[in-house]
Amino acid sequence: MIPIVLVGAAGRMGRAVEAAAAHADDVRIKARVDLSARVVLPGPASGRTGYGGAEAAGTEDERGAELADVLAPGDVVIEFSSPAGCTAAARLCSERGAALVSGTTGLDPEEEAEVRAAAGRVAVLRAANFSLGVLALRRALAAALDALPAWDLEIIERHHRRKLDSPSGTALALAREAAARRGLDDGALRFGREGRVGARPVGEIGIHAVRGGTWTGDHAVLLAGEGEWLELRHVAEDRAAFAHGALAAARFVAGAGPGLYTLDDVVRPGGRTGYR
Ligand code: NAD
């Protein structure tokens, strides 16, 4: 049984991980941590709420635990919280010898560096998107870019109205990977267009963020050539998509040494999983 400490347990993703874990027989939620006073503990009905489970049935705890009070060597922290929650978890995991699966997006470069520093002492797996479908999209995009080196590339993402950061961490990761594959740097990224911007420069990678409603996560990558275009698109209908990837990542880091890992280490090219 892998002991999981859930940071951000009261949030949308925390509750989705809780619901997915209720259906897994190799992980156990050891403790729930959240700044909010509304931490939902699984109740008798939680097994029947399905993987969507964001509105999981259960009782509400008065408060989540303090991470420093519960974290022990060998634990795996799964955090979907905030940049402050993420860096605090990284520091404490590194001090206590616990592994970290981290999904918070919108970290600034200093915060990212803090998470990377923890990876010098413990296993840390970060992903801007834990969906295994997005992992497949990234691999498909790499193949398409190789086949279509001169085509224009635009990324359009849609998310729910409450999302705090724009563009999404996934759109940024897709754009940066594409830029690197084309030998370009972040200067190639173009965030929206307005006014008389002129003709599209060669090599530009456009990124557009749409916000509204309850979209869980939608990423369309457009490759446009002469008289033809190609769209690679992933739609997450439910946060269960991310929760399942996060649990797979937890299984991987539970058996991994110190280092900074990605989902590519969990599902290796060729379809082999990186854990038993
Ligand atoms: P949310 O607002 O529903 O939940 C966040 C929870 O974290 C809240 O309950 C909040 O009280 C708690 N929290 C905030 N700071 C904390 C701290 N310092 N310590 C403990 N708890 C803290 O948000 P959400 O939709 O669950 O998303 C959380 C983060 O995960 C966001 O950055 C989001 O972009 C990201 N996310 C990533 C993925 C992925 O696959 N990587 C998928 C979905 C969301």
Image (cartoon, rainbow, N blue to C red):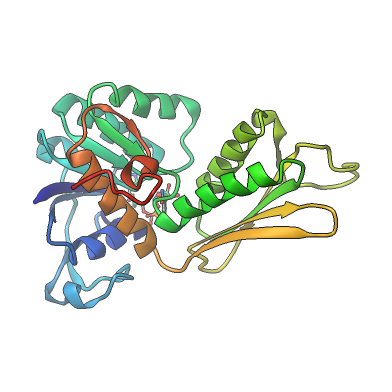
Judged left or right of residue 68, residue 162 is right
Judged left or right of residue 89, residue 42 is left
Judged left or right of residue 212, residue 132 is left
Which of 47 and 260 lies nearest the eye of the viewer? 260
Identified at 36% across, 26% down, the residue is: 116
Could you tell me residue 57's position as x and y percent? 22, 73
Q: Work out whether 83 lies above or below 160.
A: above
Identified at 71% across, 33% down, the residue is: 188
Could you tell me residue 78's position as x and y percent? 26, 46
Could you tell me residue 6's position as x and y percent? 22, 49
Q: Is residue 35 visible?
A: no
Identified at 12% across, 61% down, the residue is: 25
- The number of numbered badges drawn on the structure is 0
Could you tell me residue 216's position as x and y percent? 48, 63
Which of 155 and 138 lies nearest the eye of the viewer? 138
Which of 85 and 94 lies nearest the eye of the viewer? 94
Q: Is residue 146 visible?
A: yes
Judged left or right of residue 272, residue 158 is right
In the figure, residue 59 lies in which quadrant? bottom left
In the figure, residue 70 lies in which quadrant? top left
